[in-house]
Image (spheres, helix red, strand yellow):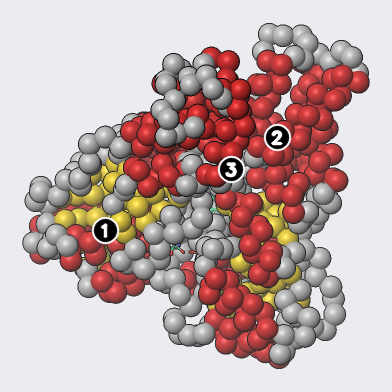
Amino acid sequence: VGKSKVDDEVLDDLEEVLISSDVGVETTVKIIRRIEERVERDKYVSTSELDLILREEIAGLLSENNIEDTNGFTIPKKNVPYVIMVVGVNGVGKTTTIGKLASQFKANGLKVVLGAADTFRAAAVDQLVIWAERADVPIVKQAMGSDPASVAFDTIQSAVAQNADVVLIDTAGRLHNKVNLMNELTKIKRVMQKVIPDAPHEVLLVLDGSTGQNAFEQAKQFTQATEVTALAVTKLDGTAKGGVVIGISDQFQIPVKYIGVGEGINDLQAFNKMEFVDSFFKRNN
Amino acid sequence: MFQNLQDKLDKALHTLKGKGQITEINVAETVKEVRRALVDADVSYKVAKDFTSIVKEKALGENVITSLNPGQLMVKIVHDELAKLMGGEVAELKIDDNPTIILIAGLQGSGKTTFSGKLANFLKTKKNKKVLLVAGDVYRPAAINQLQVLGEQIGVDVYADLASKNPVEIAQAAIAQAKQNGNNVIIIDTAGRLAIDAEMMDEIRRVHQTVNPTETLFVVDSMTGQDAVNTAKSFNDVLNYNGVVLTKLDGDTRGGAALTIRTVVDKPIKFISTGEKMEALDVFYPERMADRILGM
Ligand SMILES: Nc1nc2c(ncn2[C@@H]2O[C@H](COP(=O)(O)OP(=O)(O)OP(=O)(O)O)[C@@H](O)[C@H]2O)c(=O)[nH]1
Ligand SMILES: Nc1nc2c(ncn2[C@@H]2O[C@H](COP(=O)(O)OP(=O)(O)OP(=O)(O)O)[C@@H](O)[C@H]2O)c(=O)[nH]1
Ligand SMILES: [K+]
Ligand SMILES: [Mg+2]
Ligand SMILES: [Mg+2]
């Protein structure tokens, strides 16, 4: 920047960096305001200190919103399968994320069962079958076009019978503004509860890391319909900065548990706050 | 949202009352509000900035006509300028070559395979073409099955070679088969890829060079945020595509990526995708897109 003191121009540049990373206007304004306050308080802040301060503010913002480091999901060792339902809009990476999770759980010695409750999209079941083979875990499926709630029910029953530790239910991609499709998720939940009353134990909302401001509406609508408990943000191996993570955590306080960083079976990482902040800045330099 | 912007502009312009003209002084705050609204709609920050300075020039000295208040006038200028930028000549698909070869490209999950099916269906039913779909994605699990299922749904042949891992080879063999079977349109579906994946970008470059398509279409998710700038540019650098397809517009995204892409690569948006069904395909209307971006 060639400046030594934080002034309006420097803050304008900062605003550009944050907005251009999909952080969103509201949260960007919040961050800028905090930095302004700090500059005022500390009297003199050099631009070289700015980077550090910004990191601190962003990490702080994530912490305030309970976004802490995780090792991903903690699967309790009870004698009941822990049910994870995976939801999200079309094409974000739900099925792929399930394949990766299945592989991780299996490697941790857990007994995994997959449920192919996307019976709508062309070859959705075939796709999950291939992931089940790759992860070497069993899958419960029915014919294309059958009732997704019925598939979910079968899956839970089968998992209980097999003494499984964890169940991953794949669902069809759906846009959050489609009321009937959102209601279908409620039905899937209700039907699973006939077998395990407190299922699903987790509802994982998958967000595409390259999505812009619409991610907020996705978080809002899916949370309302299904009580989302965790987020996975995918495709962060691309050039998208994934700033939605910051904006969404600021407004919804749902923990980000995983990030997707590729199409391979091992390309799923538990969310790490400082690593995220670091890579966020690396992407911006 | 539109009312929102209008209200904000009215507020920002209240000093103007009685003066009848937009001036340097009263326009500054307005321009900032417009920029915010655009960025909120996912228009690239830089594009939004450049756009608002054009709008500012247009607005300055513009007389406030009696029927419009300054806020309304400003919104009208913004809207018209947006529509103009995204419009221009209607960009028809070129389908007269025999065979016409159409190459489909884009990021992962953007809607390429679904669009390939829709386009095949459109050309078959509306343009009376004998289409061959080509399964050029050899990576994604069940990508080939997916295209085959769609082909069956719409009654269009699909060329696939489960044994090959080479999209260039697959495309060549498909073209040979098309010639033999009298297909006059060939639509090549490809794997999703990131613009920074050098190997994968090189692969599609080779497919492009080998088949020399009549049309190359870049398929982009309308929910895309600020990254649209990078991907649209990078894919254009490699493929110099003829047109853009915006997908998932049945959602509630404002779709600012449309303006970004139009501005940075100056390629027309040829189709929009508005659902998962094979019929959910539409041509692009710049006016409607301008309304949408402004939340009207
Ligand atoms: N680069 C990259 N690609 C990913 C990642 N996660 C998923 N993908 C790709 O994104 C595309 C869509 O992934 P899917 O898992 O089919 O997405 P989905 O949400 O199940 O899609 P629908 O069921 O059709 O709604 C595929 O090509 C995946 O390989 C990721 O972290 N990085
Ligand atoms: N609602 C809606 N969904 C769409 C639209 N276009 C595609 N989809 C859905 O988006 C998801 C991804 O579509 P695909 O056609 O598989 O995308 P792709 O680009 O071929 O994906 P990869 O091959 O994995 O890169 C699927 O669930 C489609 O049904 C659309 O216009 N509206
Ligand atoms: K997407
Ligand atoms: Mg899926
Ligand atoms: Mg595809």
Which quadrant of the view contains residue A217? Answer: bottom right
Both marks 2 and 1 on one chain: no
Measured Cα–Cα span from mark 3 to mark 2: 20 Å
Measured Cα–Cα span from mark 3 to mark 1: 37 Å
- Image mark count: 3
Amino acid under disc 1: Leu
Q: Secondary structure at mark 2?
A: helix
- Please report the residue visible at 68 percent of the width from the left and 83 percent of the height from the top: A190
Q: Nearer the viewer, mark 3 or mark 1?
A: 3
- Please report the residue visible at 31 percent of the width from the left and 48 percent of the height from the top: B284
Relative image position of residue B288 (x, y in whole percent): 37, 47
Give whichever of B293, A44 is nearer the camera. B293
Q: Is residue B164 visible?
A: no
Pointer 3 with pointer 2, Cβ within 8 A: no
- Please report the residue visible at 72 percent of the width from the left and 43 percent of the height from the top: A246
Give whichever of B59, B146 is nearer the camera. B59
Q: Secondary structure at mark 1?
A: helix
Q: Is residue B228 visible?
A: yes
- Please report the residue visible at 43 percent of the width from the left and 45 percent of the height from the top: B291
Residue A207 position (above or below residue A117) = above
Pointer 3 with pointer 1, Cβ within 8 A: no
Query: Which label belongs to residue B4?
Result: 3
- Output the chain of dot 1: B
- Output the chain of dot 2: A
> What residue is disc 1 on?
B119
Disc 2 crowd rating (10 Å Cα; few below 14, some 14-19, many 20+) is many
3 or 1: tag closer to the N-terminus? 3
Residue B32 position (above or below residue B121) = above
Relative image position of residue A194 (x, y in whole percent): 71, 90
> What residue is disc 2 on?
A28
Amino acid under disc 2: Thr
Quadrant assignment for the C terminus of chain A: top right
